[in-house]
Amino acid sequence: MVPKSGKNLNIPSPRHRPGEEPEFDNLDIPNAGTVSRPDIMTDPKQMFDYANTVIRVLDMKNNALGEWDPKLSPDDMRKGLYDMLTTRIYDDRMQNMQRVGKMSFYMKSTGEEAVSVAQAMALDKKDMLFPSYRQQGLLISRGRDLLDMMNHCLSNSKDNCKGRQLPIMYTWRDGNLFSISGNLGTQFCQAVGWAVASAYKGEDAIAATWVGEGTTATSDFHHGMTFAAVYNAPVLLNVVNNQWAISSFQGFAGGEKATFASRAMGYGMPGLRVDGNDFLAVYAVTKWAADRARNGGGPTLIEHFTYRASAHSTSDDPSKYRPEDEYEVWPLGDPIERLKNYLIEIGEWSEERHKAAMEEINAMVIKKYKEAESFGTLNSGSRPEISSMFDDVFKEQPDNLRRQRQQLGV
Amino acid sequence: MVPKSGKNLNIPSPRHRPGEEPEFDNLDIPNAGTVSRPDIMTDPKQMFDYANTVIRVLDMKNNALGEWDPKLSPDDMRKGLYDMLTTRIYDDRMQNMQRVGKMSFYMKSTGEEAVSVAQAMALDKKDMLFPSYRQQGLLISRGRDLLDMMNHCLSNSKDNCKGRQLPIMYTWRDGNLFSISGNLGTQFCQAVGWAVASAYKGEDAIAATWVGEGTTATSDFHHGMTFAAVYNAPVLLNVVNNQWAISSFQGFAGGEKATFASRAMGYGMPGLRVDGNDFLAVYAVTKWAADRARNGGGPTLIEHFTYRASAHSTSDDPSKYRPEDEYEVWPLGDPIERLKNYLIEIGEWSEERHKAAMEEINAMVIKKYKEAESFGTLNSGSRPEISSMFDDVFKEQPDNLRRQRQQLGV
Amino acid sequence: MAKMNMVQAINSAQDVMLERDDSVVIFGEDVGYFGGVFNCTEGLQKKYGEQRVFDTPIAEGGIIALAIGMGVNEMRPVAEIQFSDYIYPAFDQIVSEASRLRYRSGGEYWAPITIRTPCGGGIRGGQTHSQSPEGIFTHVSGVKSIMPSNPYDAKGLLISAIEDDDPTLFFEPKRLYNGPFFGDPKQASQGWDKHEKGEVPEGYYTVPIGKANTVRMGHDLTIITYGTMVHVSLAAAELSDYDVEVIDLRTLIPLDIDHIAESVCRTGRCIVVHEATKTGGFGAEILSQIQEECFWKLEAPIGRVAGWDIPYPHAFEWEYFPGQGRVLDAIKKVMEG
Amino acid sequence: MAKMNMVQAINSAQDVMLERDDSVVIFGEDVGYFGGVFNCTEGLQKKYGEQRVFDTPIAEGGIIALAIGMGVNEMRPVAEIQFSDYIYPAFDQIVSEASRLRYRSGGEYWAPITIRTPCGGGIRGGQTHSQSPEGIFTHVSGVKSIMPSNPYDAKGLLISAIEDDDPTLFFEPKRLYNGPFFGDPKQASQGWDKHEKGEVPEGYYTVPIGKANTVRMGHDLTIITYGTMVHVSLAAAELSDYDVEVIDLRTLIPLDIDHIAESVCRTGRCIVVHEATKTGGFGAEILSQIQEECFWKLEAPIGRVAGWDIPYPHAFEWEYFPGQGRVLDAIKKVMEG
Ligand SMILES: Cc1ncc(C[n+]2csc(CCOP(=O)(O)OP(=O)(O)O)c2C)c(N)n1
Ligand SMILES: Cc1ncc(C[n+]2csc(CCOP(=O)(O)OP(=O)(O)O)c2C)c(N)n1
Ligand SMILES: [Mg+2]
Ligand SMILES: [Mg+2]
């Protein structure tokens, strides 16, 4: 009855597979500086075009162009650069430590550092962050001690998550950063709830949340969009379109049919699509959306158009499903290189200072890591108290858990 | 800490509440015949406007106007009118029978008959229907014997659902109508699965599915949209915007921010918004979308702009939350009246024939109902075999169910 | 003291908490202006304003996510799931998120949310308005499950739940809203006004979470039950020739096993009764714990009376429902072997 | 016959069915070109084409809905849920739809779908890559639950599941993919090639759904278990001073209670072992049914060995995991009181 293969069934497939020559030639990317910057209170109905373009400030010749240029001070830009560098070096170090067996797992954010670092800078410290697992730059930009981050990743005796979570699933209450979930997308509508509470209390703080483009298919994405629209919640809803969801390219989330930013239209909120590798552009759209939200303008959806330069995680081998050098031809370059070159261009940075900064960060990361190891790793040294594994299931330990703890003899 | 009431929290509220004078004066509704009809294979990106207007053929002066006029034969229109009338009379009768205790529950589709009847006519019999609970016109138009429908609603010995479902949750395999679920929205992505299978098999049949506007908030809606877009499934995704979801007006599904049809844009599919009380317009957009799907053009989202004239169900009292006469000022009138008047206008119908048709249908419904009662009602007469309640949990009855059946002594 | 039915008691609990604590808000489908499809929030929006009692989109997963986010922002949301048959779309948010948040964050965040949801059958609701899904949640670590059987307990437990800093599932046996139900639909229904548990204080009070209640003392056999089946079991106990003790659990998780074990070890015989389907139901857990605690005192196998392992069939509601007859049969079997 | 590990056996079952039946299609997150995060579909897209083995959006509820719709259109979809920890977003589609469809439609429609999903811990996956949620589904009427413990059974049962006209949940204990696991992570791991159940026919064969298997005979005590814990229990049995019988359930629903009861009534003592959290787990149901069937033959309370009632903690994986020691303690307790 059924033919040997599906006749009219359309299955998306990516531009290239291993062994093929990667190219992104006909990607529709406008020149930097060409997209106008609307007033923050613009009616979303007028904003369809912003979801179908790419908002860019930095061109590939190290100029900052157009209405979206946030005109950051050199100090701010240097802080951004420094934090992005720290994120990358931290990621590299941690991945290596995973490779040598000190951790069970790791996930890098290489190539996407501008998203988290620029956004953290454009938001206030009181704003609440509901990230996915690939925004470690948020913690770094907000000043989380790398030692604490490492302690968590090592599940050691100083891990504030008490050894309960996989590495990179950070929690940081003092930094207004929510507990990262292993279940994709769940934070999206939770962030809306947080924002609704802020509006309810008449407070000025807003919420921001992140999902990958693959995660837009989850129900949580839709719930977040719907609830944010209905209650006009002061929240930034970010989609990091890094082209890949493990081995599935963005077409499996619908990215070949429409931009992710354009989802916003159907909910009546602005959707902005931004060059995610352009620190200044990411900063600018984030500021725009944050100002809008604080002004009572409600939610904004931001699509960060970027590329996942590394493997999905340490459990993944991307050369099985994409050309190994695909990242090198990514037309929007590398966020660190681009900001660095711009700062050099305007005389606020130099190759020497860059090299020195890298060395400084490297040394610091190594030192912190040594210190972290002294509190234990997953396989050696000290761990959290074993008995603590029965805590925090509930606020007070119920009898069955007390008995189970006793049975284990701890 | 928290103020006595939410300061900046936006809670949507409907135009009117009981005791207020209903009006829909500033509803943005274009004149009939003014919207153009694009080619069926038009790129969805070019179709934003169709989601933000109202496609209409019949004006309020009984003219059929514009490019969308499907030019149906008088016979077809009379069949449509007859089936809509049957649906309404059937609904009224069944509701009355519920009131006198013959059934546990009932739900009318009054005011929305054009949606189901015109759509059933515009689709092929081989096309598979995945309705919500408010499209009984689909069965009627496809020729389901009212006796069978009644037997189901009465949960009697002839109920093809064997007494297991609430009234109105029809199943009709021979009519290619899926089993209606009590859980809102679940059918939406199932219909996509059916359509994907049809494409896989290289068959010509398409699927169609319906949800209310309130149900667009469910995860199933989003999944249906996403999967249909990704696999380019030949499916019609219908949203019946009848303004109310029990007591919640459409603003609680996001309807104040954007039209439901415009959701389509973000998934890269056409979204058509149609006057749901205009039989000819509903027929025409359905045909357009069906032709597109059959042609390999993939899914279309259709928003039927209509009004739920009756209570949500027999468990509901709408005068508690909306003006009782709101329906009377609904600017798009009544679908039956409009088609009837048009047919009269063009000399293909008359008040007398209408009266005669109503009487005929009435008599038929009464007769069928009597016959149905002879097979039992929920509270008297015969029922399905009690032992059958243990069947169909699985294809073969497992031991635990056999034992439970024995324990019950049946 | 006032006469209240269970709807009024539940309404009153929310009223009291809205009044006492500005961080309490109530939301769900149709709970605002309309006051809920069972009237459990009737009048509350009018009294406290749209921002404190409001409708939501029809997305149970979104409702619970909203509640979690608000809870993290120092509020105490009370979310209604209109029928517990419709709680499944929220399953991931309840199980993976609300229930795990405190644990996974090392205690830095938690979800002080209350989820109210009508459950149970006996109202001709068919398979999608009759389910008792508590047994799916009692397997989940990190969420408390409560099911009251009368207005007094309902109000006191609901206030406790709202004040609790852990997520709580508050199952409301809808068949009991207007009066106790003894399992026979042909018997004239009776209101709560004649029942001592229909006497409810108007103000604030609590009934503690995690404490079972012996509602009938007896020497021969213990029935462990909760929700609607408390009344059915009591009625069966009256009809029985034996001296039957009946325990109303009130809270399922955490389970008051000490209270249960004391009784069963004393009577030596036991039946567990619930309306949910039998296989894998919470009755199996109760039975298992009793078996563990009282094995040497048991004089007969512990009986289970429960719904059959089928969806709740519309036309066979009363054949599905475990009524007095089935409880009596079980008593007989456990007493006489 | 060939040597296969469990991944290969699962792959082979799908290969056989794709070959035999054009209505079989396979989909899920990353199952297509990539072949699945555990390689269970490796090579199948290449062999059968993109239309028969393909990736999906990340929406587990959508995946199951898609499968149901395809099943209604006369296909036999096999859907992978990447980790069973991520099955919850599909809960409503599995419970309210797939499991109820045949019933509610009076037998006119059904969902002949197979849901494959890796489960269980022991791979340092933390709380969201280690769960054993079978106990949530075994309470649901209308869906079969299967959990094999070795390559031979895995292939034969998976073929049976795909051919079954009812929805089946096929839980794959991921810790067993590459070899049997005896509960001690420090012990050198062993592949399936040395295990007799690593001998797997290359072609079509079935292992029947609903039949338990006695994997070790004994006189003193019966262990009822499934999945990874079969091997842990066997290892404990070897170490024990007693003559222990071990039953591998293989299928949880429908439960082969006759097989179980025969054994327990004979040995008079029993332990139920699973990796899932204890309270409300499927062990409680097994225990309850044994208690009902074998009460008069029981010489000691039935023991339960299970995961603690907590999320699976990353750093305390081996303190959570019910290893040989805990099984041995339970044997001792049941034998010696
Ligand atoms: C609900 C759920 N389903 C599946 C997974 C397994 N999984 C982890 S990451 C991932 C891909 C996510 O891709 P994307 O959203 O694009 O984020 P990215 O990794 O690219 O940052 C998948 C499928 C999960 N964690 N949660
Ligand atoms: C998942 C789920 N949640 C809640 C309900 C209860 N419920 C039944 S109908 C309804 C309103 C639906 O409104 P809409 O989608 O607009 O359809 P309409 O009734 O207007 O046709 C609600 C909330 C349900 N049946 N299923
Ligand atoms: Mg991605
Ligand atoms: Mg509606």
Image (tube, coloured by chain):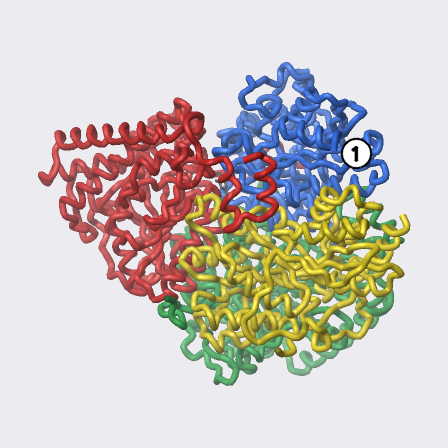
Chain colours: A red, B green, C yellow, D blue
Q: Farthest top residue?
A: D194
Residue at left 34%, top 48%? A303
Q: Farthest left residue?
A: A347
Residue at left 62%, top 52%? C253
Name the quadrant of the N terminus of chain D. top right
Q: Is residue A369 visible?
A: yes
Percent coordinates x, y for residue A56 in the rendering = 24, 46
Q: Is residue D110 visible?
A: no
Q: Residue A37 versus residue C46: which sits nearer the camera?
A: C46
Q: Residues within 10 Å of mark 1 (few under 14, many from 20)?
A: many
Tell me the SS state at disc 1: helix
Percent coordinates x, y for residue D91 in the rendering = 60, 48
Which chain does the numbered disc 1 sit on? D
Q: Amino acid at mark 1?
A: Ile
Q: Residue D98 versus residue B174: which sits nearer the camera?
A: D98
Residue at left 39%, top 48%? A178
Position of residue B389 in the picture relative to residue A282 (left or right): right
Res A91 → quadrant: top left
For ligand 1, the image quadrant comes to top left
Q: Residue B120 versus residue C5: which sits nearer the camera?
A: C5
Q: Residue C37 versus residue D22: which sits nearer the camera?
A: C37
Percent coordinates x, y for residue A341 in the rendering = 16, 36
**In the depicted structure, whether residue A29 falls above or below residue C8:** above
The residue that disc 1 covers is D260
Res B140 → quadrant: bottom right
Position of residue A397 in the picture relative to residue C220 (left or right): left
Residue at left 72%, top 72%? B94
